[in-house]
Image: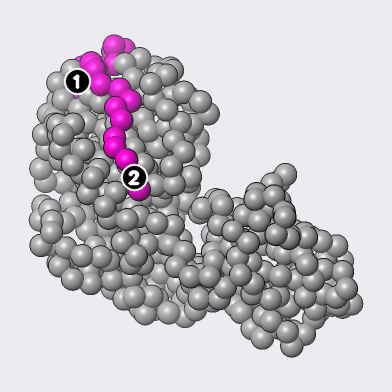
Amino acid sequence: YASYNGPLYQVKRASDNATKDIGLLSAGGFANAAAQDSFCANTSCVITDIYDQSGKGNNLTQALKGHWPGPAAGGNDNLANAFEAPVTVGGHKAYGVYVAPGTGYRNDHTNGIATGDQPEGEYAIFDGTHFNGGCCFDYGNAETTGNDDGNGTMEAIYFGNSTGWGHGSGNGPWVMADLENGLFSGVNRGLNAGDPTVTNRFQTAIVKGGPNQWAIRGGDAQSGSLSTYYSGIRPTVGGYNPMKKQGAIILGIGGDNSNTGQGTFYEGVMTSGYPSDATENAVQANITAAGYNSGSTSTGSLTPGSRISLQATTAPCCTNDYLRHDDADTKVVISNITSSSPATDKADATWIVRAGLANSSCLSFESANNPGQYLRHSNYELYLNTDNGGSSFAQDATFCPTTGNSGTGHSFQSVNFPTKYIRHYNFTAYIAGNGGSNTWDNTKSWAQDTSWLTASPWN
């Protein structure tokens, strides 16, 4: 695909429902993220289509209602927020597909995808820190019916920490195979100690299968080689030998549209034929050379991609305090941070500035040490959360910067409660108005409490 110069994906903006294909900076090169940023300015966008680069037309679009309905109109699944998974690749800005629960993509009418017991290979790059135990965050081969058609009618890569069928060593997450009615980490349901817990920020995940033979492989997508987690015969429980694959392609959901899983997808390939380990090793070398990174490109400014800390300005109490997430729970607080503070505290007080999830001309704040988790308000209190698929998350996590209400630094206005700003009150963070019914709307020190200095990052 070094000569590919077509579109990678399509976005649709909320302001007028117009769509735009996002292509490449040059043939075989990097995504043109600036085209997305420009098209989606002052509004939000979702990813509507993920284009097949093979020429076979196996594009992924919104998953329609299956056995399990989705949260969108007609029981269909949601589409991914186009700004929720920013990264850099080779130093160039790019966006992944952030799958919150209820989000899914599918193609039930494919060309050239393995069916029955035909051999195939699948690899994907996932965010190794974004997962849950829901069923099922998958990428791969599934039923064309949207239903559970029985054992062996799927062969997809699963990523998460579900233990309902099979699991690996440790607490997870694990790369496993969704073969329908079973997430397999090895030859049998249950524990396969050779399937390790993933700790990588970016994870290469591989599942491949042929007649009575299949394998799971994986590795760090930023460096190093692949490991084989399982390679052997098909599961010995009934229905998986021979396989009965149907050839649909899914992303973010199970074959029957089970859609409570979550994860982030950056790229993936499905092949007809069983790839050799040597071929996959060469692919891994290409992936690590591409240079995936978390997307923090500068420090100390409110430009998206910059890593910052936010320093309180209220004197005399709090001028050495910084906005941080609390490790004991998901609440956001302020606390004293100095050069001698523990490394964890410094990391908790560091944020990556992102384009606003609900309005790309405003800002969202991603935790530097909990990728994919954003500062958001709920019942006016601030928390660090993963997008749970709720309709208001993007708005709750978007803030528009203004000149500091005290005349110092910046204030951050809630996009969906524009009279309220990020405020510390009794060392806890809220969105607060200058007067109101909540305790934290107290007018005393409001202007100072809502004004923040954009400081160099502690981590």
Q: Residues within 10 Å of mark 2 (few under 14, many from 20)?
A: some
Residue range (magenta): 222-243
The quadrant in which residue 384 appears is: bottom right
Q: Nearer the viewer, residue 224 or 327?
A: 224
Residue drawn 31% across the image and 76% down it: 35
Seen in the image, is 356 located left or right of residue 56? right
The quadrant in which residue 334 appears is: bottom right
| Above or below, 42 relative to 213 | below
| Above or below, 36 relative to 209 | below
Seen in the image, is 361 located left or right of residue 120? right
Label at residue 315: none
Q: Which residue is mark 2?
A: 223
Q: Which residue is mark 1?
A: 213
Seen in the image, is 327 located left or right of residue 191? right
Q: Does the image show residue 439?
A: yes
Judging from the image, the colouring scheme is one colour
Q: Earlier in the sequence, mark 2 or mark 1?
A: 1
Seen in the image, is 355 located left or right of residue 336? left
